[in-house]
Image: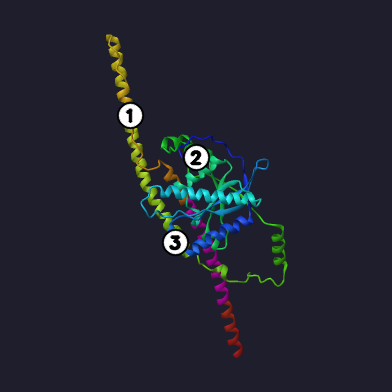
Amino acid sequence: MSTAVTITAPSVKHILLDSLVVMKIVKHVDSELHAGISEVSGDACAGVLTGLVFLEDSRLEITNCFPTVRNEPVIDDDANAAQQYEEQKQQEMLDMLRKFRTMNIDYEIVGFYQSHQFGAGFSHDLVESMFDYQAMGPENVVLIYDPIKTRQGQLSIRAWRLSTAALDLASKNDWRPELVKSAGLTYQNMFEELPIIIKSSYLNNVLMSELALSKSYSSDKYSTRHFDLGSKKSLEKSVRAMMANVDELNKSIQSLTKYTIDKQRHDNMVFSLTQKRQQENESRLARGDPPLPMDDIKRIKAPQLQTRNGLLDELLASFDTNALADFSKTVTSENITKLFIAEAVAEEKVVGTKDRTLSSVSSTR
């Protein structure tokens, strides 16, 4: 990810997503979740997006997609097995794009999609993939699909891309605190979200309208499933993941605090040594002696932040924690509303039962 690339500001402002792509993503993710492939492999469901870019309308139209092959574990000790498998994946992707072109389907790659529970799964590998795709085309995006929220009745597909500042740091592969601070980068502006408009065919719109107007259409407006508090497990998972991220952030804060103290101590020591050396050189020049070099002071090693990727992991953990908090807040507010509604209905039933009981007693008298 340290390859020097030309950073081009994207011009796409919104995304037009075909309903066929939505159905393909949902089917792909649900089939792998049902088979348990995601839990066994540990990788997220992923695929490639194809479509067209309309610069005059600042619109990215995603018209089709196809899943990518999962990484298979290398059983033998052959060092070239992983490389051969990656070449096989690239060849299969090229074959699929070639078939798209033969069938007169949009074959231009405009990004990729992944599935993450609660919409929180941003990792170092995902940032690398986003950088590679945006280096290939500045308009490319990633679609994050949340199967948990979708199963609860709310389709969750969000489009993201790296901001220009994050793309610049990713091209340098340098996430030191000084560079992150000078770029003004935080977890809030590291990624840019684009609005999505789902496009359906005219026949589909007509069918939905006829179903809505049909008297024989069985509506579930009187169903009690809307009062189901079936989000206990998902809420518990999100809270546990949030707690794990907060623990990692606490460790990172301790490392960053230690680094800040060591950096201040190092800067003060270098400054004092430089001042002493300058005074000593002035004295030597006054005596006619040659000045001493500053090379030994410059060679003093500066402290390093004791993290693997600088502040990148901290930014991603903060972003995931914010996504988990938003999910927990949404689920909690919905459950509280359902509880209040259920309590009001129960009280109304109790009052009605008492009234009927009193009326029956008075009639017997």
Q: Would residue 261 be counted in the magenta stretch?
A: no
Residue carrying label 3:
236
Looking at the image, tell me whether mark 2 or mark 1 is earlier in sequence order: 2
Q: What element carries label 1?
A: helix
Q: Where is residue 6 in the image (x, y as percent from the top left)?
A: 53, 34
Q: Where is residue 303 in the image (x, y as percent from the top left)?
A: 33, 35
Q: Position of residue 219 (x, y in %)?
A: 65, 70
Q: Would residue 340 be counted in the magenta stretch?
A: yes
Q: Is mark 3 on a helix, strand or loop?
A: helix
Q: Is residue 21 visible?
A: yes
Q: Nearer the viewer, mark 2 or mark 1?
A: 2
Query: Which quarter of the figure has residue 27?
Result: bottom right
Say which residue appears at 41% left-offset and 52% top-offset: 245
Q: Nearer the viewer, mark 3 or mark 1?
A: 3
Looking at the image, tell me whether mark 3 or mark 2 is earlier in sequence order: 2
| Residue nearest the viewer, comparing 292 with 251 | 292
The disc placed on residue 349 is: none
Residue carrying label 1:
268
**Mark 2 to mark 1 CA distance (whole Å):** 31 Å
Disc 3 crowd, CA 10 A, few/some/many (<14, 14-19, 20+): few
Q: Which colour scheme is used?
A: rainbow
| Magenta stretch in the rendered image | 322-350
The amino acid beneath tag 3 is: Glu
**Mark 3 to mark 2 CA distance (whole Å):** 32 Å
Left or right: 347 in relation to 105: left
Left or right: 29 in relation to 75: right
Residue carrying label 2:
166
